[in-house]
Image (cartoon, grey):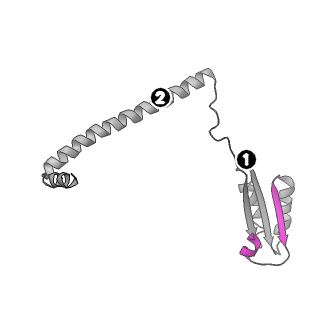
């Protein structure tokens, strides 16, 4: 059956092939456009009806897992507070862990100052530099 279909398809002239594909595209494309427009109008009507009644839609995501962000650095004292401020508060259940890898520029003190004012920030300081992989471990 497949060979018969392939034989028929290869026997068509380019004009016949374009005509058949054009008709299929017109039929299927209009069906797709009609279904998409119908669903969009249904969603719009449902949203407008809820808005007029004063009903807020329920939250789609009821589960919010906790996330931990590790910030490891060496002599990043000049940028650590800005980095912490840009990440802190971006997620409901976020914990920030700052690892100072033997810095000499006061990175740990600046991170501790930020942690004192913001909940969910933990600062760990290493006395000797061990490298990024060591600090991540």
Residue 42 badge: 2
Residue 131 found in image quarter: bottom right
Residue 102 x, y percent position in the rendering: 82, 75
Residue 29, magenta (yes or no): no
Residue 78 x, y percent position in the rendering: 77, 67
Residue 35 x, y percent position in the rendering: 39, 34
Q: Secondary structure at mark 1?
A: loop
Question: Mark 1 packing: few (<14 Cα in 10 Å), some, or many (20+)?
Answer: few
19 on left or right of 59: left
Q: Secondary structure at mark 2?
A: helix
Question: Mark 2 packing: few (<14 Cα in 10 Å), some, or many (20+)?
Answer: few
Which sits earlier in the primary sequence, circle 2 or circle 1? Answer: 2
Residue that label 1 marks: 92
Give, as a single range, the part of the protein colored magenta.
119-137
Q: How many marks?
A: 2
Q: Residue at x 14, y 47 (%)?
A: 16
* Position above or below: 44 against 94: above
Query: Looking at this view, is 11 or 16 the one in front?
Result: 11
Q: Are marks 2 and 1 in contact (CB under 8 Å)?
A: no
Query: Looking at this view, is 103 or 44 the one in front?
Result: 44
* Residue at the top extreme, as displayed: 53
Alpha carbon separation for disc pair 2 and 1: 32 Å
31 on left or right of 86: left
* Residue at the front extreme, as displayed: 1
* Quadrant of the frame with the C terminus: bottom right
Residue 121 badge: none
3 on left or right of 112: left
Q: Residue at x 55, y 23 (%)?
A: 49
Residue 120, magenta (yes or no): yes
Q: Residue at x 45, y 32 (%)?
A: 39
């Amino acid at each position: 059956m497949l060979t018969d279909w392939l034989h028929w398809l290869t026997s068509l002239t380019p004009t016949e092939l374009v005509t058949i594909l054009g008709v299929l595209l017109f039929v299927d494309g209009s069906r797709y456009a009609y279904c998409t427009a119908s669903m969009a109008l249904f969603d719009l009507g449902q949203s407008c009806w809820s808005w007029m009644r004063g009903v807020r839609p329920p939250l789609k995501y009821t589960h919010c897992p906790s996330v931990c962000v590790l910030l490891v650095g060496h002599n990043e004292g000049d940028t650590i507070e800005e980095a912490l401020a840009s990440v802190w508060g971006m997620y409901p259940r976020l914990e920030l862990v700052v690892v100072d890898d033997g810095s000499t520029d006061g990175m740990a003190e600046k991170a501790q100052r930020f942690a004192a004012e913001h909940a969910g920030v933990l600062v760990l300081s290493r006395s000797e530099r061990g490298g990024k992989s060591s600090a991540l471990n």
